[in-house]
Image: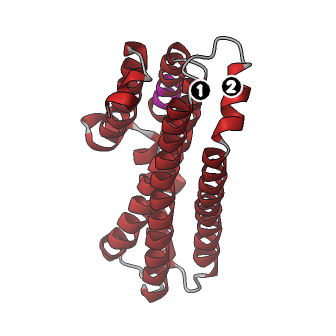
Amino acid sequence: MIDVLEQFSGWDGLALSWFFICWVGFTLVADYSALRTRSVTAAVNYYRKQWMIQMLKREMKMIDTQIMGNLGNGLAFFASTSVLIIGGLSAALGAGETMVGILKDIPFTDNTSRLAYDTKIILLIGIFVYAFIKFAWSFRLSNYCSILIGASPSMIEDEARCVTVAELPARLSGLAGSHFNRGLRSYFFAMAALGWFINAHVFLMTTTLILVTQYRREFRSRSLNALQQGRTLKEFE
């Protein structure tokens, strides 16, 4: 353990701590704080509920099953991509000596020892394992939602009953979307972790840049404005 710590400076420890503070902190703010009601995710969840209400009013549900199929394809793509990335990183871990030699030739690169390199690769592997778990669980929740759509009654004319019956599939769809968002967020922060292969200062900057980008897209984006404005249209009431 002491040998591992000797390979890293105080800046490395600061950058790694800042990385996890940003990642975990943003997740807590976006998913659990009072701000979550003003996020893109919350705006989309409103339309998920409207979708399920409209689904209950239709006699045939081919449109809904097709939409769920398209969503499932995207989830399967990201889950399989995560596995491929994990395989590539494992191969990079085995080729450590060669990669360390390449990193030493890159300007401004610090901590190019084999132990430091392996630690950084293991960090990336851990991130993508987490992403795979999130995408796989999201895919499973989408399957559950598809089953609920298939089991839902058709041609419900009573609006109050539509709202009540639509609650469960909408919640499952929202949970699937939440896990998908966390998996996708892992990809963004994995891009920030790549900065550590250069040096701790770049790692700090890339982490901060990703944090600002994520905050803007979740709470200050034009897509959020469009979704919020759409709620005022009569066809969504």
Spatial CA span between label 1 and label 2: 8 Å
Nearest to the observer: residue 101 or residue 77: 101
**Which quadrant of the figure contains the N terminus?**
top left
| Numbered mark located on residue 9 in the image | none
Q: Does the magenta run of residues contain 213?
A: yes
- The answer, for residue 181, to whether it is visible in the render is no
Residue 127 is situated, as x and y percent measured from the top left of the image, at: 48, 46
Secondary structure category for the residue under label 1: helix
Residue at position x 50%, y 17% in the image = 200
Inspect the image, locate mark 2, and give the three-letter code of the amino acid beneath it. Leu
For residue 226, what is the image quadrant?
Answer: top right
Nearest to the observer: residue 225 or residue 231: 225
- Per the rendered image, the range of residues in magenta is 211-216
User: Which comes sooner in the sequence, label 1 or label 2?
Assistant: 2
Residue at which label 1 appears: 197
Residue at position x 38%, y 60% in the image = 175
Secondary structure, magenta segment, majority class: helix
- The answer, for residue 191, to whether it is visible in the render is yes
Residue at which label 2 appears: 103
Can you say whether 58 is above or below 224 in the image? below
| Tally of marks | 2
Label 1 crowd bin: few (<14), some (14–19), many (20+), radius 10 Å: many
Can you say whether 147 is above or below 129 in the image? below
Residue mark closest to the camera, 1 vs 2: 2
Residue 162 is situated, as x and y percent measured from the top left of the image, at: 37, 74
Circles 1, 2 touching at the beta carbon (< 8 Å): yes
Q: Does the magenta run of residues contain 21?
A: no
Residue at position x 49%, y 24% in the image = 207
Q: Is residue 221 left or right of residue 169?
A: right
Secondary structure category for the residue under label 2: helix
